[in-house]
Image: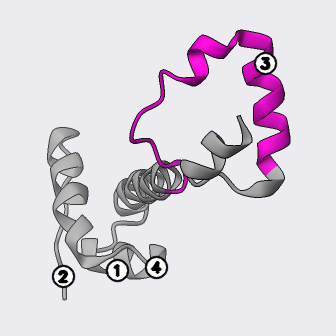
Amino acid sequence: MTVLLTKINVQKEEIEGIVGKIEERGIKEMFAIENYDVQETRRVAKIEGKIEAAVKIIESLKITVSEAMRILELPRPEQEKVVKELEKRNIPYVIGQ
């Protein structure tokens, strides 16, 4: 189990807790994981959280998309996702510089 968790890039300090949970649920579930990277999943979740935060501060503070992205340290390619979310929610916005 430890080898599998190491292979999917789980930090060593988390392995013990995860191994315990897997043992509780059964070995079969452990092998259902393919091409899964814990750190990548966390990175994506963090960016999604920042996109949501950008939408909220743009709406509440009336700042530009560019300002929100700078404040939240969102990478430039994520601007399109922020704009799509603003449009989906009918929130007025200005891109800015």
- Would you call the spot at circle 3 few (<14 residues within 10 Å), some (14-19), or many (20 or more)? few
Separation of residues labelled 2 and 3 (CA atoms) = 52 Å
Separation of residues labelled 3 and 1 (CA atoms) = 47 Å
94 shown above or below 67: above
Q: Which residue is mark 1?
A: 67
Which of the two discs, 4 and 3, labels the residue nearer the N terminus? 3
Asked if residue 41 lies left or right of residue 2, the reply is left
Q: Secondary structure at mark 4?
A: helix
Q: Which residue is mark 3?
A: 23
Q: Amino acid at mark 2?
A: Gly
Total labels drawn: 4
Residue 3 percent location from the top left of the image: 67, 45
Disc 2 and disc 1 in contact, CB within 8 angstroms: yes
Which of the two discs, 2 and 1, labels the residue nearer the N terminus? 1
- Would you call the spot at circle 1 few (<14 residues within 10 Å), some (14-19), or many (20 or more)? some
**Magenta part of the chain:** 14-39
Disc 4 and disc 3 in contact, CB within 8 angstroms: no
Q: Which is closer to the viewer, label 2 or label 3?
A: 3
Q: Amino acid at mark 3?
A: Glu
Q: Secondary structure at mark 1?
A: helix
Q: Main secondary structure of the magenta part?
A: helix
Separation of residues labelled 4 and 2 (CA atoms) = 13 Å
Q: Which residue is mark 4?
A: 71
Is 12 in the magenta? no
Q: Which residue is mark 2?
A: 96
Q: Secondary structure at mark 2?
A: loop
Quarter assignment of residue 34: top left
